[in-house]
Image (spheres, coloured by chain):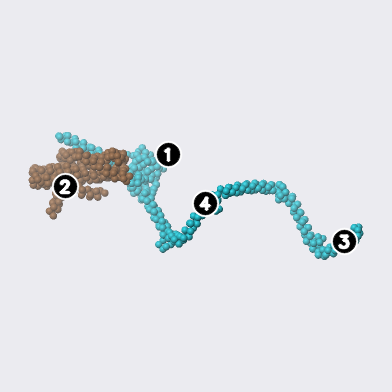
Chain colours: A brown, B cyan
Amino acid sequence: MNKLNQLLDAFGSALLLTGRAFASLPSAPRILKRVIEQAFLGGYSSLGIVTILSFFIGAVLALQAGLTLKDFGAKQLIGTLVGESLVRELGPVMVAILLAGRVGSAITAELASMKVYQEVDALVTMNIPPERFLVLPRLLAVLLYMPMLTMIGVIIGWFGGAVVCKFVEIIAVEPAQYFQSLTQFLTTEKVLDGLIKAEIFGFVIILIACNTGLRTTGGPREIGHAVTRSVVFSLISILVLDYFITKALA
Amino acid sequence: MNQNQMTARVGLFFIIGLALIWVTFEALHNGRFSTKEGYTVTAAFSSLKELKAGNDVRMAGVQIGTVERTRLVDGRAEAVLRIRSDVQIAADATATIAMAGLLGSNYVSLDLGHPANGTVSPGGSLRTKDVADLNQIIGDLGNLGQEIKSTLGQISGSMSSDTGGGLFQKLDRLVTENSAKISTTVANLEAVTNQIRSGEGTLGKLIYDQAAYDQLLATVNEIKGAATEARTFINETQSLIAQVKSGQGTLGTLFYDEATADNLRVTVRNLREVSDKLNDANSTFGQLITNDNLIKDVQGTLRKVDRAMDGLGDQGPITAVGAAASALF
C-alpha cells in the first residue's frame, strides 16, 4: 500500500511538474541558451553511442532476418523487415533506453545533488522557479532533439542492415534491392509513428529524471538511489508505454 | 568548450537530423514535404483493393507517378493519381490495378494507348478496367476444390460402398468366387502362349514357322495379282460401258440408237401380232395349234400312208409314188 502511495505520489508530482514547467513557457526565449546546452548534452553528445548501437542493431537484425528468411526464399524482404522494425520499434525504444541510461541518469544525479545540497532551495529563495530554470529547458530540448536522434539512429541502422546484406555471403542481397524492399512497404505514416513514439519516450524519460531528482530527500546516499530509481522507472515506463502507444497508433 | 562551439555543434546536429528526416520522407514517395509537381488525373474503380496513397503509377512498367489519395465518389472508389508533367497519357489508355508481387502492394498500371488520338488533360479521368484480384481467384479455386472433392467423394462412394455394393467389393467378390476358374484360365492362357512360342498350332506356326510365312507371302502376292487383274478387268469393263454409252458397237447401237429402237419396236409389234394370230383359234396357225381334230386327221392320214407304204413293200418305187399320190389326193 505504501509503494502504491509512493507511485501515485510520484505520478502526481510529475504531472504538477509538467504543468508548472509549461506554465513558464512564455519565458522560453530567455532560457534558449540553457535549451541549447541541454540539446548538446542530450542530443549531440549521445550521437556517438547512438550511431554505434543503431548500426549494430540494424546489422544484427538483417543478419537474423536473412538467416531465417533465406530458408523461406524470402531474402528480398529483409529490407522490409529491418526497415519497419527499426523505424517503428527498435529505433525509438533503443534510443529511449540509451537516453534513460545516459541522459536521464545524469539529470537525476544532477538535480538530486542540487536538491540534497539545497541549491534548489536557494533558487526558490531567489524567486527562480526550479521548474522553469531546471526542468523546462531539458523538456524543450528533448522534444527538439529526440526526433533527430531517433531518425539518425534509424537511418544508420538501415545502413547497418545494408552492409550485412552486401558483405555477408550467406545472405548476399544487393543494397539496391534491400533499399527497394525497404521503401516499398514503408510509408511516412510509419516513420511518423516512430518519431511520435520517440518524442513521447524522450519526454517521459526526462520528466521522470527531473521529477525523481527534485523529489530526492536526505543525504548523498539518496542521490545514488534516486538515479537507480529514475533509470529503472524510465525503462519500465518505456516498455509499458511502448505497448500502449503502438496500440494507439495502429 | 565555449558557448559558440557548443551552439554550432547543436546546430549541426539539428541540421543533420532534419535533413535525414526530410530525405526519408522524400524517399517514401508520398512525403508530405514533397512539392506537388506534375498534374493529377482520376481513375475510378469498383474496388481499389490494396491500393493506397504512395503506390506507384506505371505506364508499360515505367513509373510515371504516384497515387496521391483515394476516395469514394458517387459509389465508386476513385484514386487520384499524380503524374509527372513530362508524361502524357493517351486518351484511350486503360488503367488497371496490378499486383507488385504475391506479398507486394498494388500499383496502377496504364497501357500506352495511342497518344495520336489525344491525351488526357490535367484533372481528367482515365478509362479503367476492373480485373479479378487474388482473393477472387483463390475463392474460385476454393469452389473448384469443393467440386473436385465432392466428385471424388462420389467416385469413392461408388467404388467402396458400406452396403457391399461398391465396385471394389464387387470386384473382390468376383475374383474370390471365381478364383479357381481364373486360375484355370490363366493356366490355359499360359499353355497356349507356350505353345505359340514353341511354334505349335496355327497361331504358333503363323508367328514362328518360316514356311507358313512364305506361303502367306505367296498368297498375299497372288491376292495382289488377282487384284491387279480385277482392276484391269474393271477398267476394260468401264471402257466397254463407255463405248456402249457412246453408242458404239452392237450393244451401244441396241441401247442408244433410235433407229434400231424403232426397228425393234416394229419387230416386237409384228411378233406380237403373229403371236396373237397364233393364239387366235380361227386363224390357220391357231387352228393348227388348238384344233384337236386336225391332229386326229393328220394322224389318220399318216396311218393311211403307213398302210400304203406297207402295201408298196413289194411294188416298185413308181407305183409307190402313184399309190401315195392317189391316197393323198
User: For mark 3, what is the residue?
Assistant: B309
B294 over A48 or under it: above or below = below
Q: Nearer the viewer, mark 3 or mark 4?
A: 4
Q: Give the crowd class for mark 3: few <14, some 14-19, many >=20 residues within 10 Å.
A: some
* Residue topped by disc 4: B198
State the SS at label 3: helix
Q: Which amino acid lies under the numbered mark 3 shown in the image of this protein?
A: Met
Q: In the figure, B307 relative to B237: above or below? A: below
Q: Amino acid at mark 1?
A: Ala
Q: Amino acid at mark 2?
A: Val
Query: Which of pointers 1 and 2 indicates the residue nearer the eye?
Result: 2
User: Which residue carries the number 2 mark?
Assistant: A232
Is residue B255 visible in the rendered image? The answer is yes
Name the residue: 21% across, 43% down.
Answer: A95
**Residue A30 sits in which quadrant?**
top left
From the top left corner, tell me how far across and down residue A115 is, in percent.
Answer: 10, 44
